[in-house]
Image (tube, rainbow, N blue to C red):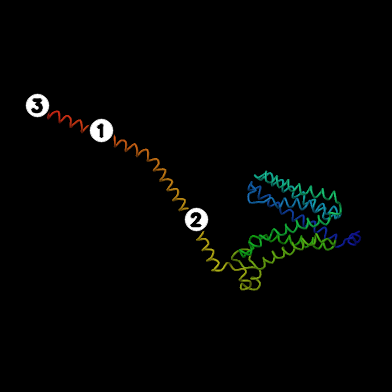
Amino acid sequence: MFTEFFRNLTLLKCLSVSAFITTVMLFFCGIPICVNIWKRRSTKDISAVPFLMGVLGAAYWLRYGLIKMDYTMIAVNIFAATLMGIYLTFYYFMTEKKLWISIEVCAVIFLISLMLLLVQLFGHGIIHPLGFTCMTFNILNFGAPLAGLKVVLRQRNCETLPLPLCIANLLVSSQWALYGVLISDIYIIIPNAIGMILAMIQIALFLVFPMKQGRLSLVQRCFGPSCCAIAASPPSSDENEKLKNAYKQEKNSLLSSNRESIQIAGCEQKSLIIDEMKPKKSLFNHAIKSNEIKNKLMDSELNKNESEKQNDIEAN
């Protein structure tokens, strides 16, 4: 029995099983994201795009696998569509931007419905456009880590790169690229070959750059600190000086803007005080004028009394 089993066990069958297992394990990488969302009780700074693209890509690849009757692709993408749908549902219930997520989900449903309609109308004649679309989705997904490479080259350390995920991407991409070669499917070969190259570049960065700033890279540990010193060293003094100058300029601009705002606020406060003092000043001036009038009347009365007394004296 075992002899018959191993006799029928070809390279393609072995590769199908291993590719299915590793791909399914890679899809479980969404669980830590969901756990993080649950702990924070918020989806802030966490995008739903990976889950949306996962559902969309899995649906397209599933229909492509059904047209070709490739049971490995069918099994993998049924699992992927289900798991990504669960992630997306969890994200929807945890996010505060339900309207925007609903619009994005409707867009994904529209694209899937359009694809199914075109397949229903054209049948096997649409297999090449569908394969090209699936290939494009995979290339876009593999191109997402390029932003992480830019951060690594700027910081000169691999602290932002997850090494286990890079190794998993290399393993999955290489298996699917070989699977595409065995079944002669260019739409599987091209995106997975690109993903394999990008994963190899990411892993190569761990050899050149240290895991954290201030440590030695793997190449430096093997061949001495002088090896790859330029690549793994922190920014030079000139770069530090430029950063300091940029920081000073930004700080001065912030201070000047604060001073201007304080001056404007002071002027506004002064104008308010002046406006409040105007009626008080007018009342004060009115009071002074009334006192002056009273004094004048009193002086005139005194003058009259003195003149009357003087007239009485002269009459006597």
Decide: few, some or many residues near mark 1? Use Cα within 10 Å; few <14, some 14-19, many ≥20: few
Would you say the residues marked 3 and 2 are in contact, meaning their CB atoms lie under 8 Å apart? no
* Apparent side of residue 255 relative to residue 35 in the rendered image (left or right): left
**Closer to the camera, 274 or 197?**
274
What amino acid type should be assigned to the residue bearing mark 2? Leu
Which residue is labeled 2 in the image? 254
Rendered location of residue 263, percent (x, y): 44, 51
Rendered location of residue 157, percent (x, y): 62, 64
Q: CA distance from mark 2 to mark 1?
A: 59 Å
* Apparent side of residue 281 relative to residue 249 in the rendered image (left or right): left
Q: Nearer the viewer, mark 2 or mark 1?
A: 1
Q: CA distance from mark 1 to mark 3?
A: 31 Å
Quadrant assignment for the N terminus: bottom right
**Closer to the camera, 273 or 52?**
273
At 50% across and 55% down in the image, what residue appears?
Answer: 254
What amino acid type should be assigned to the residue bearing mark 3? Ala
Which residue is labeled 1 in the image? 294
At 12% across and 28% down in the image, what residue appears?
Answer: 311
Disc on the earlier residue, 3 or 2: 2
**Closer to the camera, 314 or 194?**
314
* Apparent side of residue 231 relative to residue 243 in the rendered image (left or right): right
Q: CA distance from mark 3 to mark 2?
A: 89 Å
